[in-house]
Image (tube, rainbow, N blue to C red):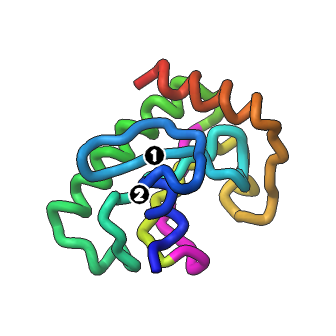
Amino acid sequence: MPSIFTRIINREIPCYKIAEDADNFAFLDINPNSKGHTLCIPKKEVNKITDMDPEAYESLMRFSRKIAIALDASMDCLRVGMTVIGLEVPHVHVHLIPLQTMADATFQKKEQLSPEEFEAIAAKIRSNL
């Protein structure tokens, strides 16, 4: 059964898309730690980052860096944190989280955003790519 992220890539589930290339896809996390929290994923469904072949791993990291630079230019933050963590979706995903404090990286504090706020944030990030 395809992961929820594969279903997002296949446009079966809507998302607030930031960008995609031939191998990777970026979209806003719908349960964000902070405004602008973005997920970068490989289009090929792989459960663990250590199972990725070196080329796919490097491609995902380059893609994530590009998105992180746009995110940093778009959001009022001290830095953009990057983490690969999570057991809830068996599909590699890089979290890019705009940070003001370390609490933003704990996955304990969540932002509540309207669809309009998500759309505005996604548009702002896309404009800085």
Observer-nearest of 36 and 117: 117
The quadrant where residue 114 appears? top right
Q: Which residue lies furthest to the top in this view?
A: 127
Query: Where's residue 79, x and y in %?
Result: 56, 39
Q: Residues within 10 Å of mark 2 (few under 14, many from 20)?
A: many
- State left or right for residue 33 relative to residue 68: right
Q: How many labels does the image show?
A: 2
> Disc 1 residue type?
Ala
Circle 1/circle 2 CB separation < 8 Å:
yes
Which quarter of the picture shows residue 65? Answer: top left
Q: Which of 109 and 3 is in front in this view?
A: 3
Secondary structure category for the residue under label 2: strand
Q: Name the residue under label 2.
A: 41
Residue drawn at (44%, 63%), measured in percent from left and top? 6
Q: Residue at x 80, y 47 (%)?
A: 111
x and y percentages locating residue 13 in the rendered image: 58, 54
Residue 126 image label:
none
For label 1, the SS is: strand
User: Which of the 4 image quadrants contains residue 34?
Assistant: top right
Question: Is 19 placed above or below 42 here?
Answer: above
Q: Position of residue 15 (x, y in %)?
A: 59, 46
Front residue of this view, candidates 63 and 25: 25
- Measure the C-alpha gap from mark 1 to mark 2: 6 Å
- In the rendered structure, the answer to whether residue 57 lies left or right of residue 37 reads left
Residue at 38% of width from left, 78% of height from top? 48
- Residue segment shown in magenta: 79-89
Instruction: Name the residue rendered at 75%, 56% in the picture.
Output: 103
Residue 83 magenta-highlighted: yes
Q: Magenta stretch containing residue 69, yes or no?
A: no
Residue beneath disc 1: 26
Q: Residues within 10 Å of mark 1 (few under 14, many from 20)?
A: many
